[in-house]
């Protein structure tokens, strides 16, 4: 029998990997690799959910892990790949701020997130001690990615990664949300991706490009 | 549960009248395709409803207050109705004016197209029904709902001819000021409930406020109801909205809707706040005096008849508030009997103004209908082609000019009586301040007289100034009926003041806790003695008899002495061979001396022709200084701050995301 401490160790490890992937995404210049990293993030998330389900003996979390896997490792990356093929945009990702500066800001955010999570961590037991800080950091880093990218597709990936961070916080710290809520969120993410896809085509139709700088002229005056 | 009480209480009848009006409105909307049915059937029925309501209101004044809880409203927050002496008096006012206006409407809208008329019928009935509910409401929630319904329905009535940009503009201005006022009223109720969260009027009455909070409630009520009534400096919507609305609607808005603001003010300040302080009275008195003078001075300068009448509404609201301000001063310094007198004066004038201003607006409507003109400078000689309208308008003009034995005199005389009792006060400053208000009132009365000499002389006497005047037709049957009703009321209220004052005592008994003094009203129905017969008394009937006697004697004397020596000749023409209509005095010319004396009050733009001008013309534009002092700066400040906020809109998604990001960090950092 594997002890509870051992599970905590594994979850901490997975959390660390999640954070690492977040940083990798932040520094990634190529869009295909970005999607690959996103898929990996989903896989890690799915694995951690499954482990929490096993250790806490919560059956509904198995479903949750399965949905996560199906959606975030298979469906969404496939959709995004398809989208890129159809749009024929395999460009390098352009950033507004250069990568090293982004990484430094990201470090500051991680420190901030851990600081923030400290009061909660002290109340929590086991793996939750570290995971809340890491989940918050993942959310903030994904948000940072959305801000610093110029093109629309990486922004959507940032948005989806943000949801990953929230999901991780929910499963690892509080053993998941009710099934209905999780199903709802999963559906929202899927539908959101579809809508984004439609918007990409519309944006390209209108501006002949997916560069969101073109949308600046939409403002008043 | 008994659905049909054996004996209908006044409050039941009032509620049924409201439902009846709403039904008529809906019926009007459904019958859009048959304008004749709306005109000949619905509006006269509406007048019948008004008559019932007026009778109910006056009958309810000497009864104890009755309450009713409606099965309507939000869960746990039902609507409360209450009919007491004050509500009864204002329902009487609404009904009495409503009879005339509804009868008049039956004829006035005969040329209006069906769909417009159907909509108008709905809005009209929603408007009068909501005013009745405002007067019946017994909780702040229903009061505000009815208040807003009233504002919105009247907005749609004002913008009936919304294809004209200036009418849309007038409607917007009205709606804007109405809502600023409504916010102030809402805040006043918020202050009044004193943290209990119960908004029924019974709870508001019971709540005990510190003097500071009570004063806050008073100021909010003054601003809120003042915006609706048209006190300085929130009067600007009146001269815009009244001319824009169809004439019966103007009559209702000026005659009745402004009075709902007076009702609200009395209800909130005297009844709900009720810890009266004399300082409030000073504020009201100063604002009211300035409003009175301002209104009449600007009315004199107008050449658009309906604008002129609108400025007179501003003036009359000032006169009403002088009475109420005096009542506050007396009540706050422990002179309840004097307060009762001042309040009776204010409320009496409220009713009088509803009647004669309604009549004057209806008369203006008939002129507009007959000639298509609102500009006095294009009228003239209408007494010949429109004798009935001319007669009714004359009655209204004499009433508003406060000439005995008509009704305007009674209430202004009572206001003077109240003001002249100021030596009873202990405070020396007040004793010397109140006579100024009385003097201003006297001045305003004289200027009003001058203004209506101008209106009547220019519009009805002399020779027609334009082709329209030559072919003007007189008002139709229904219009004459409506104007005749209001004219009869002007006379009746002038001749039977004791009857009404006795009823108004029931109101003051509830509001300031006193009736008129023990020596008052001892002279029976003939003599009105507000304090004591030795001090001052007035008998309109004797006045009328003396006037009639003098006129008859003069007539007989003239007939006897000059009989048979009558000869007809052309008027003296100064030796100039050709007399034409352009030689008559113009409205601007008639009021020129006043413009000269009070020049600093006006913002004038004048173009005087030079002697050498090949094409000489004269133009004069008088503007309201408050636009420059108050409204333009406020509008500029609003636009400036909106532009500053507009800078947030960068058009870059990254910046918007940054806003959210920074907000998120900020919230996480400080609100944990």
Image: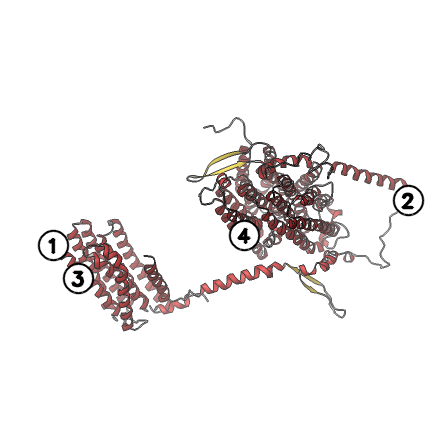
Q: Position of residue B235 (x, y in %)?
A: 60, 53
Classify residue B531 as left or right of residue A204.
Answer: right
Q: Position of residue B331 (x, y in %)?
A: 60, 42
Q: Is residue B628 above or below residue B550?
A: below
The span from disc 3 to disc 2 (Cα, nearest Å) is: 127 Å
For disc 3, the neighbor class at 10 Å (few under 14, some 14 to 19, many from 20) is some
The span from disc 1 to disc 4 (Cα, nearest Å) is: 73 Å
Which chain does the residue under circle 3 lie in? A
Between marks 2 and 4 in the image, the one whose residue lies nearer the viewer:
4
Which residue is at 14% across, 54% downward? Answer: A4
The span from disc 3 to disc 1 (Cα, nearest Å) is: 16 Å
The span from disc 2 to disc 4 (Cα, nearest Å) is: 63 Å
Specify whether disc 2 shares its chain with disc 4: yes
Quadrant for the C terminus of chain B, please.
Answer: bottom left
The span from disc 3 to disc 4 (Cα, nearest Å) is: 64 Å
Q: Tags 3 and 1 in contact by the CB under 8 Å rule? A: no
Q: Which residue is mark 1?
A: A3
Specify whether disc 3 shares its chain with disc 4: no
Specify whether disc 1 shares its chain with disc 4: no
Query: Which of these two is toward me, B119 or A214?
Result: A214
Q: State which tag comes first along the sequence, 3 or 1.
A: 1
Which chain does the residue under circle 2 lie in? B
Q: Which residue is mark 2?
A: B565
Q: Which residue is mark 4?
A: B175
Between marks 3 and 4 in the image, the one whose residue lies nearer the viewer:
3
* Badge 2 element: loop
Classify residue B614 as left or right of residue B323.
Answer: right
Residue B5 in view (yes/no): yes
Q: Tags 2 and 1 in contact by the CB under 8 Å rule? A: no
């Amino acid at each position: 029998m594997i002890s509870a401490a051992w599970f905590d160790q594994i979850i901490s490890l997975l959390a660390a990997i999640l954070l690492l992937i977040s940083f990798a995404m932040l520094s990634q210049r190529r869009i295909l690799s970005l999607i690959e990293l996103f898929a990996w993030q989903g896989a890690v998330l799915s694995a951690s959910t499954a482990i929490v389900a096993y250790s806490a003996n919560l059956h509904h979390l198995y479903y949750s892990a399965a949905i996560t896997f199906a959606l975030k490792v298979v469906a969404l990356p496939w959709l995004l790949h398809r989208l890129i093929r159809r749009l024929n945009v395999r460009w390098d990702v352009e950033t507004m701020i250069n990568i090293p500066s982004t990484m430094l800001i990201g470090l500051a955010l991680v420190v901030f997130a851990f600081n923030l999570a400290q009061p909660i961590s002290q109340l929590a037991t086991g793996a939750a001690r570290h995971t809340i800080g890491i989940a918050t950091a993942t959310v903030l880093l994904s948000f940072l990615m959305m801000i610093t990218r110029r093109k629309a597709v990486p922004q959507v990936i940032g948005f989806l990664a943000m949801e990953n961070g929230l999901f991780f916080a929910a499963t690892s710290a509080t053993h998941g949300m009710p099934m209905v809520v999780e199903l709802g969120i999963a559906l929202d993410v899927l539908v959101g991706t579809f809508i984004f896809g439609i918007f990409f085509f519309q944006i390209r139709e209108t501006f002949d490009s997916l560069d969101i700088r073109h949308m600046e002229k939409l403002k008043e005056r | 549960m008994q659905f049909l009480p054996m004996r209908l209480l006044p409050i039941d009848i009032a509620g049924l009248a409201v439902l009846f009006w709403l039904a008529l409105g809906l019926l009007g909307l459904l019958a859009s395709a048959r304008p004749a049915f709306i005109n000949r059937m619905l509006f006269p029925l509406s007048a019948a409803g008004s008559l019932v309501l007026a009778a109910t209101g006056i009958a309810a004044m000497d009864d104890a207050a009755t309450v009713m809880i409606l099965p309507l409203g939000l869960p746990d927050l039902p609507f409360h109705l209450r009919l007491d002496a004050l509500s009864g008096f204002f329902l009487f006012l609404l009904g009495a004016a409503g009879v005339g206006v509804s009868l008049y409407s039956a004829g006035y809208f005969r040329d209006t197209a069906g769909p417009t008329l159907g909509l108008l019928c709905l809005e009209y009935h929603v408007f009068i029904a909501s005013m009745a509910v405002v007067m019946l409401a017994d909780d702040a929630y229903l009061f505000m709902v009815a208040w807003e319904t009233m504002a919105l329905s009247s907005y749609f009535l004002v913008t009936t001819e919304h294809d004209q940009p200036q009418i849309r503009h007038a409607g917007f201005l009205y709606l804007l000021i109405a809502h600023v006022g409504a916010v102030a009223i809402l805040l006043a109720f918020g202050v009044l409930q004193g943290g209990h969260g119960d908004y029924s009027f019974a709870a508001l009455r019971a709540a005990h406020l510190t003097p500071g909070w009570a004063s806050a409630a008073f100021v909010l009520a003054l601003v809120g109801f003042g915006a609706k009534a048209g006190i300085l400096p929130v009067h600007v919507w009146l001269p815009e909205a009244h001319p824009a609305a169809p004439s019966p609607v103007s009559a209702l808005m000026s005659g009745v809707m402004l009075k709902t603001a007076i009702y609200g003010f009395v209800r909130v300040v005297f009844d709900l706040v009720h810890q009266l302080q004399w300082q409030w009275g000073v504020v009201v008195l100063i604002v009211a005096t300035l409003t009175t003078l301002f209104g009449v001075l600007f009315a004199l300068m107008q050449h658009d008849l309906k604008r002129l009448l609108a400025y007179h509404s501003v003036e009359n609201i000032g006169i009403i508030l002088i009475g109420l301000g005096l009542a506050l001063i007396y009540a706050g310094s422990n002179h309840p009997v004097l307060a009762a007198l001042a309040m009776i004066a204010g409320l009496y004038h409220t009713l009088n103004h509803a009647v004669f201003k309604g009549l004057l607006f209806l008369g203006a409507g008939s002129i507009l209908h007959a000639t298509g003109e609102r500009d006095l400078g294009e009228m003239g000689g209408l007494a010949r082609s429109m004798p009935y309208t001319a007669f009714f308008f004359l009655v209204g003009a004499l009433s508003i000019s406060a000439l005995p034995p008509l009704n305007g005199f009674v209430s202004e005389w009572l206001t003077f009586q109240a003001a002249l009792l100021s030596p009873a006060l202990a405070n020396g400053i007040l004793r010397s301040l109140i006579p100024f208000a009385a003097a201003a009132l006297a001045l305003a009365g004289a200027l009003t007289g001058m203004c209506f000499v101008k209106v009547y002389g220019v519009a009805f006497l002399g020779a027609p100034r334009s082709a329209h005047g030559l072919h003007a037709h007189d008002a139709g049957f229904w219009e004459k009926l409506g104007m005749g009703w209001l004219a009869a009321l002007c006379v009746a209220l002038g001749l039977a003041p004791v009857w009404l004052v006795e009823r108004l005592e029931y109101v003051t008994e509830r509001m300031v806790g006193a009736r008129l003094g023990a020596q008052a009203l001892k002279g029976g129905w003939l003599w009105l003695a507000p304090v004591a017969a030795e001090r001052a008394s007035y008998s309109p009937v004797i006045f009328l008899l003396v006037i009639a006697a003098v006129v008859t004697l003069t007539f007989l004397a003239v007939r006897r002495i000059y009989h048979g020596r009558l000869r007809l000749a052309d008027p003296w023409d100064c030796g100039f061979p050709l007399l034409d209509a352009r030689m008559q005095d113009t409205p601007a010319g008639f009021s020129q001396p006043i413009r000269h004396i009070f020049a600093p009050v006006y913002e004038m733009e004048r173009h005087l022709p030079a002697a050498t001008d090949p094409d000489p013309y004269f133009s004069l534009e008088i503007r309201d200084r408050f636009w420059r002092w108050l409204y333009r700066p406020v509008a500029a400040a609003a636009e400036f701050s909106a532009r500053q906020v507009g800078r947030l809109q960068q058009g870059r998604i990254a910046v918007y995301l940054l806003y959210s990001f920074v907000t998120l960090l900020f919230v996480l950092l400080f609100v944990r």
